[in-house]
Amino acid sequence: MTAAPVPVLLVHGGAGVIRHGTDAAREREVRAALAAALRAGQARLLAGDPALDAVTAAVTVLEDSPYFNAGRGAVFTHDGVNELDAAIMDGATLRAGAVAGVRQVRNPLQLARAVMERSPHVLLAGAGAEAFARAQGIERVTPDYFHTEDRWRELQDALRQGAHGARVDHFGTVGAVALDAAGQLAAATSTGGMTGKRWGRIGDSPLIGAGTYANAACAMSGTGWGEFYIRTAAAHAVCMRVALLQQPVPAAADAVINHEIPALGGSGGAIVLGADGSFALPFNTDGMYRGCATGGAAPRVAIWPGEDFA
């Protein structure tokens, strides 16, 4: 008789972390928030709940924190508003749900899951997504809920730098991937997008196969310069390498995240989890907020290169 898989949960809070912009106090808060997200998702896995519940629980904690570019801590658009995107996918069934450009939904991932479970669609955007949230009783907030002074300053900096022709990179996204005791995988991603984005720009996070994907063999949530994740269909590409080419998870993740995307001029990171419990957390930026919880072991979190998980 085959033993039940050991549940595994990975989370990320975004790539592109800059060491000189992270003081000790903020670093402690970020690590604590990552650990809290892991504990929330891990509790669901240890209770025997499906991977979908684990990633939902973990990402909801990260969306409620002001330290990550999702939910409460979302960045501002060029026009000074917050537009939120999210997606979730069930690897066992290939069901998926996503939302883009919502402005008054406290936890966009919960709305994305409602799209998957309570509608015939995969992706809803803008006013239509907001109307669906109202119809489904998803918690909504006033736009000022998302206003944080750190993000407002980032926008002002971006506008000033943009006026001088400089490219401004403020990467950030949150995500989770999980393997449950039944051997099933799920992936979820949530983001406020890119600081100073214009014209209703939508990145990779809510696009199934770009920033979020799960099948029976692999689950991935990405973080980075979304346009390049879209162009490479990064999450799908990684999981197809695992599923069809039978590449080990670390090799598949490295090939796409650290080679294909940089070759086009992009950068970022990802969390990738296989059905065998193997995982990878590649990134090619200064740092990436990340963490893992295996079985009932204490969650482990990291930010900087060299903080590896055995």
Image (cartoon, rainbow, N blue to C red):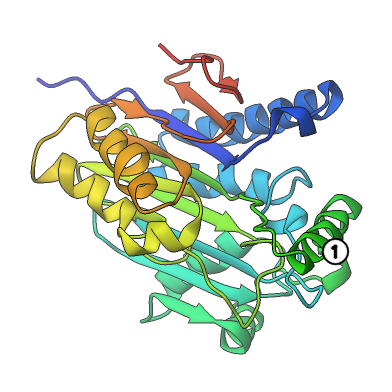
The answer to whether residue 46 is above or below residue 72 is: above
Instruction: Say which quarter of the image contains residue 247.
Output: top left
Q: Quadrant of the N terminus?
A: top left
The front one of 43 and 76 is 76
List the residue tagged with mark 1: 145
Query: Residue 32: percent from the left, percent from the top?
Result: 72, 26
Query: Residue 220: percent from the left, percent from the top?
Result: 36, 45
The front one of 295 and 59 is 59
Query: Residue 260: percent from the left, percent from the top?
Result: 29, 47
Q: Is residue 179 visible?
A: no
Q: Residue at x 37, y 27 (%)?
A: 7
> Mark 1: which amino acid?
Tyr
Q: Residue at x 44, y 48 (%)?
A: 222
The answer to whether residue 158 is above or below residue 220 is: below
Instruction: Say which quarter of the image contains residue 116.
Output: bottom left
The front one of 183 and 112 is 112
The answer to whether residue 282 is above or below residue 88 is: above
The front one of 141 and 23 is 23
On the rendered structure, is 68 left or right of 285?
A: right
Q: Quadrant of the C terminus?
A: top left
Query: Residue 287: percent from the left, percent from the top?
Result: 59, 30
Q: Is residue 64 visible?
A: yes
View extreme (front): residue: 164
The answer to whether residue 120 is above or below residue 116 is: below
Q: Secondary structure at mark 1?
A: helix
Q: Residue at x 36, y 54 (%)?
A: 264
On the rendered structure, is 112 left or right of 78?
A: left
